[in-house]
Image (cartoon, grey):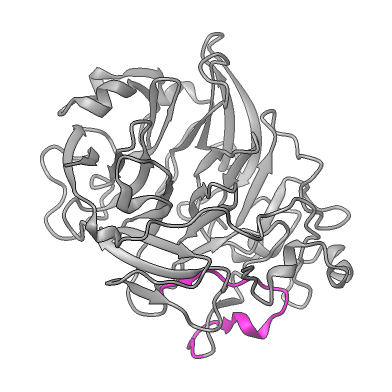
Amino acid sequence: MQRLSRRAFLGSGAAALGTLAGCLSSSYDERPVGEGEAPWPADPTWEPADSSPLDAEVREVTAVRNLSIPWDLTFAGGDALLTERTGGLRRFDAEALASDSGLTPSDGELLIRDAELPDRTGPGEGGTLGVAAHPDYPDTPVVFVYYTADDDLRNRVVRYDISADELTPVVDDIPAAEFHNGGRITVGPDRRLWVCTGDATEPAHSQDPTNLGGAILRVDLEGEPPADNPDFGDGTDSRLYTLGHRNPQGIDFTPDGEPLIAEHGPQSRDEVSALRPGANYGWDVARGGPTDTQYDAYGDYEEFTPPLLNTGEVGTWAPSGVTFYRGEAIPAWRNRLFVAGLRSQTLFCVTLSADGNHPEGGNRFDADWLDDRYAVTVHKFYDGEYGRLRHVEVGPEGALYLLTSNRDGRTLREFPKDDDDRVIRIEPA
C-alpha cells in the first residue's frame, strides 16, 4: 500500500507550489519551495530483512591502521578509494581490504597529495572530505573529490583524471567555514553526482535558492545541472535538488534509487530524511515537533518536509556517513540503512518499513509529525567500542567498513588508541 505523508506532494510538481517557485528571498516570510520534476519512488519494491538486525553473526577486523583522520571511502573497479581530512586521496586494493588485517597507509597508493589540490586548506572540520568514482571506473579512470580551498574560503568538487593526472573543477563556490562544511559526495544510480553541502554556520544560506550552502546538489558528471532537476524559480541555482539543510554528511540510495540523507542537528535534533525533488527541509526555522522548546514545529509549515526521524532535544547521534546495505553476506542486515555516529560513538541501524512493521528490540520513531513514508526503527551497534565513527561503507564482498575519527581532537572516553585511526571490517562470523 502506498504510504505518503501529507507533505509528500512537495516533490510532485503540484500546482499549489507554483506561487512559491519564483521566490528568491531567503527571508522566513518567503521560504522557497521548488517544483519537482524528477520522479521519486512512491511504492518501494524492496523490503527489509524479516529478522532483527541484532541477529547478525559478525566479527570485526582492523583492516587498516594508523590513518590520519579518514573521512570517506568508496569501492570501484577493484579499488578502495579513501580520503584523509588532513591529507589527500589514497587507493588500496579492494581484495586486500577484504582479506588482510593491519594494513598501513604505505600499503596504499597516494593518488593525490594534499598539496596537489589547488588552494587546499583545512580549518576546523574542513579539508579533504568526500570521494566518489566515475560509474565506468576504471575504464574511465576518473574520481571526484570534495575539499576546502583557501581562495576566499570555499568548498570545491574537482574531477581527477588519473591517466592524465589532471584536476578540473566541477562544482565551485560552495560556502565554507570552520564548521558545517557538509562534504559527502556520491554518484547515484542515475549516473548523476550528488553533493551534500553545509550551511557554513550561516543558516540563511539554507533558505536561499541562489546559494549552494545548506543543500543537496545534483549535477551531471561535468558539473552541469540535469534538465530534470527541480525548478526553484527564475534566478535560482538549477544545481539545487533540495534545500533547508544544516550540515548533511551522509547520502545513499535504496534499491529503487530513492535518496536518503543524514544530517547534524543543533543541540541534538539530528535527522534522517527521504529526499523529494524540490523539497525544503526547514532549517533553521522548523527542527522538531510541537513540544520543541527552541525551534518551530514542522507541522506549522505546509511548505516544509519533515524528516523520517529526529533524535529530539536530548542525546545526539552526530551522524556522518551512511550506507544502505544491499548485500547478501549478512542476511539480517539486508535492506537496512547504517549511519555512522561521531559524538555518539555508535553505529546505528535504521530499518525503514513501508508496510508499517517494526522489528523487535529497537527504538521506534513514530511521532505523528514525522514523515510517515516509512515506519522507522533503530538498533545500536558498537556503542563506544571504536570511538568516533566518520563513515560506513559496504564493500563489494558484502562486509561493512567503518572509518574512525579519533585523531580529530574531539574524542570522548579513552580514545585515540595507539593504532587509530582505523578502517574496521565487519564481516560474517
Above or below 334: residue 352: below
The residue stretch that appears in magenta: 291-311
Q: Position of residue 414 (x, y in %)?
A: 11, 55
* Magenta stretch contains residue 261: no
Is residue 344 in view? no
**Prevailing secondary structure of the magenta residues:** loop
Above or below 277: residue 226: above
Placement of the C terminus among the 4 image quadrants? top left
Q: Report which quarter residue 108 is drawn in.
A: top left
- The residue lying at 82 percent from left, 62 percent from top is 13
Placement of the N terminus among the 4 image quadrants? bottom right
Would you say 303 lies left or right of 130 here?
right
Q: Report which quarter residue 118 is drawn in.
A: top right
* Magenta stretch contains residue 309: yes
- The residue lying at 69 percent from left, 39 percent from top is 219
Would you say 173 lies left or right of 90 here?
right
